[in-house]
Image (cartoon, helix red, strand yellow):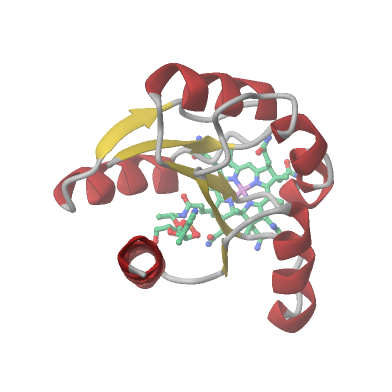
Amino acid sequence: MKVVTGVVGNDIHVVANRLIDLSLKARGYEVFNLGVNTYLEEFFDACVETGADILLISSLNGEAEGWGREIKSLKSRYKGLDHLIMMIGGNLTVGTGDPQTIIPKYQKYGFDLVCHQIDLNTGLDMLQDFIAKRNDTSDRKSSS
Ligand code: B12
């Protein structure tokens, strides 16, 4: 499966991005890594160009809270992204934050998987489970 990844906005924390790239490749994904300082339009452009199945965004300095609000309206301007799995992780607010507030907020922004201060491997396991469940549901739909 194809994954577009990168760090959103004016965020220059690069270490996690490198680890995500390596970990995704180790799990067999085809990775298009846009690196740090990536804007939402660039993410969606890359998803369309590559035919990505997954968009995996990192935010380490917490500014995604601001960018997230624009996701839904921006995504609706692109064609062919209905199937795209949207995932975000890192530090999703400034400070520690409460996952019970943060997770629903990002789900409302349109993310399928929200990993606030969650270990990378746990997050990638969550992604695999999500894909397996989705495939299961569409298999059942097509056989009924
Ligand atoms: C190194 C560092 C810097 C370096 C970055 C160098 C570089 N080019 O990478 C420098 C000094 C430049 C820097 C600058 C700043 N930093 Co800084 N930085 C750090 C520090 C010490 C380590 C980050 C790091 O590399 N960690 C190692 C990697 C491997 O871990 P990680 O980043 O946490 O990533 C893991 C997880 O988050 C997770 N993950 C990440 N993304 C995703 C996505 C998904 C889907 C999943 C599942 C998991 C996942 O997996 C990764 C691997 O395990 C952290 C504090 C800390 N101890 O974490 C602060 C920290 C991230 N920085 C912080 C801040 C505030 C800043 C500045 C705004 C400071 C300032 N006032 O100027 C600037 C921002 C600059 C910018 N424009 O982005 C804050 C963010 C606070 C917040 N969100 O509330 C932190 C947490 C420090 C703190 N405690 O306040 N920083």
Left or right, residue 57 beside residue 31: right
Give the quadrant of residue 92.
Answer: bottom right
Q: Position of residue 14 (x, y in %)?
A: 46, 38
Please name whichever residue, 58 or 130, is drawn nearer the observer in this view of the structure: 130
Q: Position of residue 142 (x, y in %)?
A: 35, 60
What residue is drawn where x is 36% and y is 73%? 122
Question: Where is 119 relative to 79, above or below?
Answer: below
Question: Where is 67 relative to 60, above or below?
Answer: above
Please name whichever residue, 141 or 1, is drawn nearer the observer in this view of the structure: 141
Left or right, residue 61 beside residue 20: right
Give the quadrant of residue 11.
Answer: top right
Question: Where is 25 relative to 114, above or below?
Answer: above
Quadrant placement of the C terminus: bottom left
Q: Is residue 96 visible?
A: no
What residue is drawn where x is 69% and y is 78%? 99
Give the quadrant of residue 38.
Answer: top right
Q: Is residue 143 visible?
A: yes
Quadrant placement of the N terminus: top left
Q: Position of residue 30 (x, y in %)?
A: 24, 35
Q: Position of residue 85 (x, y in %)?
A: 49, 50
